[in-house]
Image (cartoon, rainbow, N blue to C red):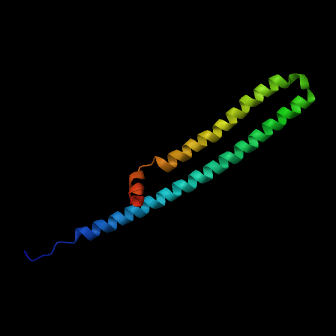
Amino acid sequence: MGNRKKPNNISTRKEVNSSMEAKALEFFIACVTAAGFGIAIAAFGCGIGQGLGLRAAVEGIARNPESSGKVTVTMLIGLALIESLCIYALVVALILIFAHPQASSIAALFAP
């Protein structure tokens, strides 16, 4: 019983660490991809919404030039609210990229 060899825990730990690093990197790649698609969809939707709002405002001013002041103010407020949706999507994308549980593992992979 005294001649029994102990299993090599160092190589097992290295395999587990490399497996965890690979999974962390896969998770990071998925987060970056999701963030990219999220921003693209948000920008596309906000662009369409702003274009439709601007078109309606210009048509309204063309039909009744006297109401241009009220229409312009309302249009600018609406455009700001639409743009805020895209900014919220940007915040969510940044959270996906930079604030996830495995950020320290991924940062350690790229550290010199």
Q: Position of residue 30 (x, y in %)?
A: 52, 57
Q: Position of residue 97 (x, y in %)?
A: 50, 50
Q: Position of residue 41 (x, y in %)?
A: 66, 49
Drawn side of residue 61 relative to residue 20, left or right: right
Q: Position of residue 82 (x, y in %)?
A: 69, 36
The answer to which image quadrant residue 92 occupies is: top right
Q: How many marks?
A: 0
Drawn side of residue 24 relative to residue 54, left or right: left
Q: Residue at x 22, y 71 (%)?
A: 8
- Quadrant that contains the N terminus: bottom left
| Above or below 66: residue 58 | below
Most distant residue in the right direction: 63
Q: Residue at x 9, y 77 (%)?
A: 3
Q: Residue at x 80, y 36 (%)?
A: 54
Q: Residue at x 25, y 68 (%)?
A: 10
The answer to which image quadrant residue 110 occupies is: bottom left
| Above or below 17: residue 83 | above
Drawn side of residue 12 relative to residue 100, left or right: left
- Quadrant that contains the C terminus: bottom left
| Above or below 28: residue 13 | below
Drawn side of residue 54 relative to residue 108, left or right: right
Most distant residue in the bottom direction: 3
Closer to the camera in the image, 15 or 106: 106
